[in-house]
Image: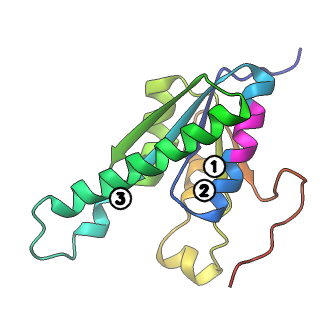
Amino acid sequence: MLQNYKTILVAIDGSDAAEIAFKKAVNVAMRNEAKLLLAHVIDLRAFQSVASFDGILAEQAEELAKKTLDEYVDKANVAGLTNLDTVIEYGSPKAIIAKELPEKYEVDLIMLGATGLNAIERLLVGSVSEYVIRHSPCDVLIVRTDLDNKTPSVKK
């Protein structure tokens, strides 16, 4: 029996890698007649170094996330996918993508763009995709190629 996914999570962060993962996720969702969950996680650690943090930065980050997700919803609708939802969360992207969202939304496939971090960056920052692969209760697909299965050229 072939695996049919019912709920597919794709993490959207505005990066080129996330864009590629989104495009493939739309195709996978349409083939599986699955729901696509577009998620953006606002990492609160980014605000810890701001001495006068009063919520304005978080509000601006949320507005930008809403705008970005709305654009992706429009793209999915143009491609023919209407069974989708969006979510904005605050906290650690690693834990939220790997554990919280799959449990809350019964996700059975997570699709993430490859970040392209080098070994030093992974050591210092840690790779979200690496963490998700290790801790997620469901299948994880790391997307490295475009819709033609070609490695995208790096923008300089």
Q: Is residue 24 magenta?
A: yes
Reply above or below: 116 against 38. below
> Answer yes or no: do the residues labelled 1 and 2 have beta carbons within 8 Å?
yes
Q: Mark 1, mark 2: which one is toward the viewer? A: 2
Q: Which residues are magenta?
A: 23-28
- Give the spatial CA distance, label 3 vs label 2: 15 Å
Whole-percent x, y for residue 70 in the image? 47, 42
Which residue corresponds to mark 2? 129
Alpha-carbon distance for marks 1 and 3? Answer: 19 Å
Mark 1 to mark 2 CA distance (whole Å): 6 Å
Quarter in which the C terminus is drawn: bottom right
Whether 98 is drawn above or below 48: the answer is above
Please rate how many residues cluster around mark 3, counting C-alpha atoms within 10 Å: few if below 14, some from 14 to 19, many from 20: some
Amino acid type of the residue tagged 3 in the rendering? Asp
Asked which quadrant contains residue 154, the reply is bottom right
Q: Nearer the viewer, mark 1 or mark 3?
A: 3
Helix, strand or loop at label 1? It is helix
Q: What amino acid does circle 2 point to?
A: Ser
Per the image, the residue denoted by label 3 is 43
Residue 52: x %, y % from top left? 9, 73
Tell me which numbered mark, 3 or 2, is placed earlier along the sequence: 3
Residue 35: assigned label: none
* Circle 2 SS class: helix
Q: Write down the residue under mark 1.
A: 133
